[in-house]
Image (cartoon, rainbow, N blue to C red):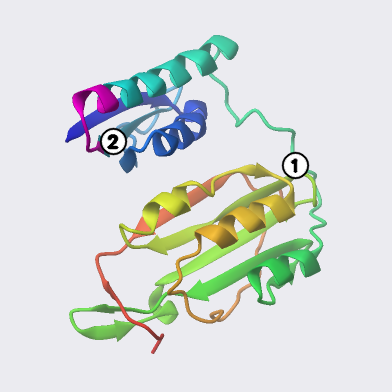
Amino acid sequence: MKIKILFLLVVTILNVTGATIESGLSVTALHNHFFFDHPRLFFMHIEGEGTVEHLASSVRLLYDKVREFRTAHPTPADSFLKPALPDISTIIADPLNKIFRSSGEVSKGMIKFTFGRPAKQHGVAIDSTIGVNIWIAFAGNDENTVVHGDFAVTENDLRPALKSWGRGPAQSLAQSIQKALPATVGTPANLMPVLGKNVGFCYKISWFPVTTSPKES
């Protein structure tokens, strides 16, 4: 077993996360240490099992990916190097509703989907009403979209969820996220409108040490 901590700039994280998963390693933590550091720096914990040669080549792949990105972008960026989002969102809801097989809540041209995650804690059934849910919100337009949300996952669900990060066309993002949704998610929870506009990229993944159950109570 090999455990390694990578010291990364924010804009490098998305590129290295994908390479980590493709190499067969696992991302076990991602965090920062300081409040006002500039540029922002994060620590990514990775883990893997296998031969020394396999693990060494996998870690080397990550360092090569970091070097490649920083050579192309030597100056730390304050954004994810994507086109600016439109001031007014105009996401068309129907294609996304079909992908998620659910009717999202639409507000000011944005759309949000919420799915309950059935679970138990200390033997007591808990559900979306106390925050054990997955929510995904889309802003921008159909070709230039940002996704923002929370995934409530077990450790076995984490790898597929990490693969769903991204910026791009709304339907492509929705299809990627749909594939990452855990099989145990319940029916859509009470949906709330998405407020604000032109939100920045952030995709949070929450891990709850709970016992999943077949149906949401």
* Residue depicted at x 68% and y 66%: 99
**Quick one: quadrant of the C terminus?**
bottom left
Percent x, y of residue 60: 35, 19
* Residue depicted at x 39% and y 80%: 127
* Label 1: few (<14), some (14–19) or many (≥20) C-alpha neighbours in 10 Å: some
* Residue depicted at x 24% and y 29%: 4
* Residue depicted at x 33% and y 34%: 44
Q: Which residue is mark 1?
A: 85
Q: Mark 1 falls on what kind of element?
A: loop
Work out whether 201 lies above or below 69. Answer: below
Give the magenta-colored segment's residue range. 48-55
Q: Mark 2 falls on what kind of element?
A: strand
**Is 30 placed left or right of 141 in the picture?**
left
Work out whether 188 lies above or below 89. Answer: below
Work out whether 71 lies above or below 86. Answer: above
**Quick one: quadrant of the N terminus?**
top left
Could you tell which of marks 2 and 1 lies nearer the N-terminus?
Answer: 2
What amino acid type should be assigned to the residue bearing mark 2? His
Depth check: 97 or 132 in front? 97
Residue projecting furthest to the bottom: 217
**Is 124 placed left or right of 114 in the picture?**
left
Depth check: 25 or 203 in front? 25
The quarter of the displayed image where residue 201 is located: top right
Asked if the magenta segment contains residue 130, the reply would be no
The quarter of the displayed image where residue 205 is located: bottom left
* Label 2: few (<14), some (14–19) or many (≥20) C-alpha neighbours in 10 Å: some
The quarter of the displayed image where residue 196 is located: bottom right
